Image (tube, grey):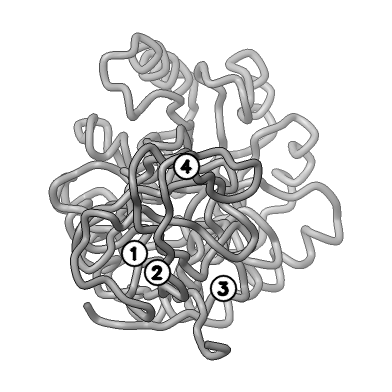
Amino acid sequence: MSSITAELLIDLSKIKKNICSLKSLIGKDSNFMAIVKSDAYGHDLKKLIVRIDDIVDAYGVVRLDEAVSLRRHTQKQILLMQGIYDDLEWNIVKDNSINFVVHDPIQFKFLKKRYPGQKFWIKVNTGMNRLGISLDDLKEVLQKAHLQNDDVLMTHLACADIPDDELNLLQFANFEKAFSQLNCPIQRSILNTNGIINFPQHAYDWVRGGIGMYGGVHHPDLETAMTFRSQIISIRDIQPGDRVGYGGRQQAKTKMKIANVYVGYADGVPQNSIDGTKVLVNDQYAPIFGRVSMDLISVDISKIDNCKVGDWVVLWGDNISINKFAETNSLISYELMTKISPRVKKIFVEL
């Protein structure tokens, strides 16, 4: 049993297919930026770049070390989405030809230092009220920036996954207001994954595809690219009244058969996963029964015939979407993808 471990199967061909599906929703004049922050949402940045570099136009990351590492593997544009804050960081982005976002007045000083090939992405706050220059402060940027045609005006949609939310219309209107203030016709970028799906008419010059690349949103043409699984290490018959797991949270009402699976919150299963969350056992759905512990989950296999020690249990992957696991537990797929533990064995496959 010591060789048993939780596994993460990653199918990079599905990510490439998902990118092509997203690109098919927008016009050919719109460039596609692949958002690969947080180690490509847990899918292994270095291995992914080799597979998709021929079909994307640029990459977006958040941390400076991610951008520097990425530059070793691609010659395409890299965007540091949180920008830079001091002269040391300026020298690093200059030496590695990394473009960055200006989203706060404290970053205005860098607008005067443009190096050859430098492209500035100016982020405006259109209603999300997180990062972004206010429409009033934008006037100051325009006075200092000396913008060029290949610079980009960008914003981020707060409710792109809820197409009927009135905030979308407000943000589109504010973005147009910001664009109308510009003294030269620079490029534009407003859409994330859900924006691509729900508002392709606003694709403009750049779209920024993130979670959809990895199959983390509901869409018929997008597939979950990772399969998270482990094996059953014991099976126990329990009687009515028997309680299972820490705190005895679940109690059997009838005779039951419980499988203990060698995966837990130290591997990336959310500790607060609720009872009844469906997993896949021998291609059949079965519910989690009892509290998730550090190394184990318990699953009710009472209705599954011929189940045995060593059988695989899939938490998400083919035939059991990561989005379903997330929604059942009031989580988001982003969190599930990025919280897989380093102790989980990664295997790259073409399923």
Q: Mark 2 is on which residue type?
A: Arg
Residue holding disc 3: 70
Under tag 3, what secondary structure? helix
Do labels 1 and 3 touch, CB within 8 Å? no
- Dot 1 alpha-carbon crowd within 10 angstroms: few under 14, some 14 to 19, many 20 or more: many
N-terminal-most mark, 1 or 4: 4
| Residue 132 to residue 94: above or below | above
N-terminal-most mark, 4 or 2: 4
Do labels 1 and 2 touch, CB within 8 Å? yes
**31 or 185, nearer to the observer:** 31
Q: CA distance from mark 1 to mark 3?
A: 31 Å
Q: Which mark is residue 232?
A: none
Residue holding disc 2: 229
Q: Position of residue 144 (x, y in %)?
A: 69, 33
Q: Mark 1 is on which residue type?
A: Val
| Residue 149 to residue 69: above or below | above
Q: CA distance from mark 1 to mark 4?
A: 42 Å
Q: Mark 4 is on which residue type?
A: Val
Q: Which mark is residue 314?
A: 1
N-terminal-most mark, 1 or 2: 2
Residue holding disc 4: 152
Q: CA distance from mark 3 to mark 2?
A: 29 Å
Q: Position of residue 221 (x, y in %)?
A: 14, 52
N-terminal-most mark, 1 or 3: 3
Q: Nearer the viewer, mark 1 or mark 4?
A: 1
N-terminal-most mark, 3 or 2: 3
What residue is at 28 percent from the left and 59 percent from the top? 280
Q: CA distance from mark 3 to mark 4?
A: 21 Å
